[in-house]
Amino acid sequence: MSNEALSQLSTELGAAPPDSLAELTEDQLASLAGALRKERESRAAGLGEAAEEALKLVPALARGPVRRILFK
């Protein structure tokens, strides 16, 4: 396992990768790290959209202050 691929994967996982991933090639590790990054970004975008949709339930005059409180 290369140091660069291991570092990328550790960053995406937020922890040291399991030892069992040592069997993967550098390209496979990079692909896994990319897939994890893409999924995290997708979830973050989905959460942002859901939050904005939920703000539509708040009366218009209160949306600004509520948005500032929730999204500091």
Image (cartoon, grey):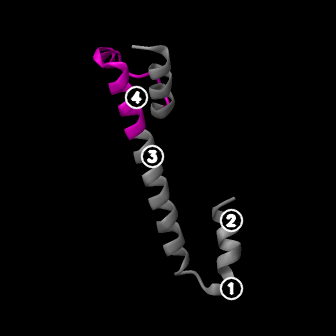
Q: Amino acid at mark 1?
A: Leu
Numbered badge on residue 30: 4
Mark closest to the chain's N terminus, 2 or 3? 3
Label 1 environment density (alpha carbons within 10 Å; few <14, some 14–19, many ≥20): few
Which residue matches tag 3? 40
C-alpha gap between disc 4 and disc 1: 47 Å
Mark closest to the chain's N terminus, 3 or 1? 3
Label 2 environment density (alpha carbons within 10 Å; few <14, some 14–19, many ≥20): few
Q: Dot 3: what SS? A: helix
C-alpha gap between disc 3 and disc 1: 33 Å
Q: Dot 1: what SS? A: helix
Q: Dot 2: what SS? A: helix
Which residue matches tag 1? 61
Q: Dot 4: what SS? A: helix
On screen, residue 61 above or below 70: below
Residue at image point 45% right, 20% down: 6
Q: Amino acid at mark 2?
A: Ile
Q: Which residues are magenta?
A: 14-35
Q: Is residue 17 magenta?
A: yes
Label 3 environment density (alpha carbons within 10 Å; few <14, some 14–19, many ≥20): few
C-alpha gap between disc 1 and disc 2: 14 Å
Residue 42: x, y in percent? 43, 53
Q: Amino acid at mark 3?
A: Arg
Q: Amino acid at mark 4?
A: Ala
Which residue matches tag 2? 69
Mark closest to the chain's N terminus, 1 or 2? 1
